[in-house]
Image (tube, rainbow, N blue to C red):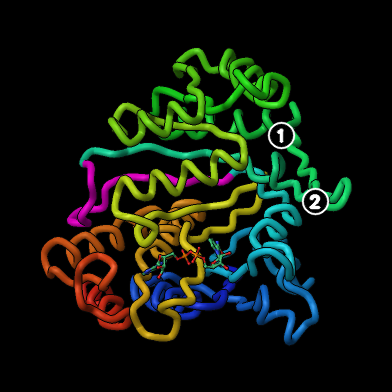
Amino acid sequence: MKHTITLIPGDGIGPEVSSAVVKILETAGLDVEWESHLAGVLAVERHGTTLPAELLDSIRRNKVALKGPVTTPVGGGFTSVNVGLRKALDLFANLRPVWNIPSVPSRYEGVDLVIVRENTEDLYAGLEHEVVPGVVESLKIITEEASTRVAKFAFEYARKHGRKRVTAIHKANIMKMGDGLFLKTVKKVGLSYPDILCDDRIVDAVCMHLVMNPTQFDVLVLPNLYGDIVSDLCAGLVGGLGVVPGANLGVEIGVFEAVHGSAPDIAGKGLANPTALLLSALLMLRHIDEGPMADRIMAALGSVLAEDGIRTRDLGGSASTIEYTEAICRRLR
Ligand code: NAI
């Protein structure tokens, strides 16, 4: 089947890793037309906005996008393209499966957990104002509606993928109302899924437990800020940001992207590891019913890492982005 997919190459290492992934998907035989669009600072130069209407229209039409990282200036400047995209398209769930990739050095073995992060509210609602000079108020928004839909997403995901447990992460002992509402809502949704154990952990405690024994966890569902932090912690459990995929999902639309950023320190040097974006693309292939192709690419990737011993510098190897990509393509031909 022919697919039309929106492609956001991004900036920094984005164009390097996205062209690597496009090449691998096409070598695997994906019948695809890419609609490529700028976002972020590059889009501002050409379109005067970080999220051009053509880009949003393209994703709304195609329902699926592959996105490279986009730089967000710290402090001033424009607001995050990633946050803007999630809001504009109502991509309410951020999915990050975290598992050990064969032969990728990591501190733990047997990690296989899934982070489901609420993507639209909490402190990321962007509601901040200066009350008086020197005092800023940032509003943390938790709603029953957003908590319900992300909880349903987590339980449905667990059921579909044969997972047995959903753990709600919160700080309801301190934020009794906001996090209390999130926790209460997840528990309520959990009542409709008697086949799945629903429990909860306080966010600081779960960080310790993840570091001590990550294999005990299955699906974690978190409000936005904790989800952001805990998902990077989890990436660190299995080898770092270079090997963890992600997806932002709404009712109909899926935007698939790596967890890492635009890595300006290595951009343009041929050092970027495309694995995380490739793994995100494999999530995308499963989403568009191309599961067997995803399996084939995963096998090729595993062979390159484990048997060929070819890896990029961040994983202790010496291959350039292009050499690594070519090695995966060779395994697919
Ligand atoms: P980063 O993830 O870009 O880089 C952190 C470190 O990891 C750097 O040393 C970098 O060289 C390395 N690294 C990251 N990805 C790599 C890869 N694929 N291969 C090899 N090494 C890799 O995080 P940082 O520096 O905090 O953020 C840089 C920019 O990216 C910021 O403007 C940030 O806002 C943006 N960002 C964008 C994201 C997105 O578009 N989804 C997500 C996270 C950050």
- Which amino acid type corresponds to the residue marked 2 in the rendered image? Gly
Secondary structure predominantly adopted by residues drawn in magenta: loop
Q: Is residue 39 left or right of residue 94?
A: right
Residue 243 appears anywhere in the view: yes
Mark 1 lies within 8 Å of ligand 1 (Cβ measured)? no
Q: Secondary structure at mark 2?
A: loop
Viewer-proximal residue, 227 or 76?
A: 76
Residue 96 falls within the magenta-colored stretch: yes
Q: Is residue 21 left or right of residue 203?
A: left
Residue 259 at x, y percent in the picture: 47, 57
Q: How far is disc 1 from disc 2 in space, using C-alphas?
A: 32 Å
Identify the image quadrant of the C terminus: bottom left
Tell me where residue 175 sits by quadrant. Answer: top right
Q: Earlier in the sequence, mark 1 or mark 2?
A: 2
Which residues are the magenta region?
Answer: 94-108
Q: Is residue 180 above or below residue 246?
A: above
Residue identifier under label 1: 146
Tell me where residue 52 sits by quadrant. Answer: bottom right
Residue 134 at x, y percent in the picture: 80, 51
Residue 97 falls within the magenta-colored stretch: yes
Q: Is residue 276 above or below residue 223?
A: below
Viewer-proximal residue, 210 or 60?
A: 210
Q: Which mark is residue 134?
A: 2
Q: Residues within 10 Å of mark 2 (few under 14, many from 20)?
A: few
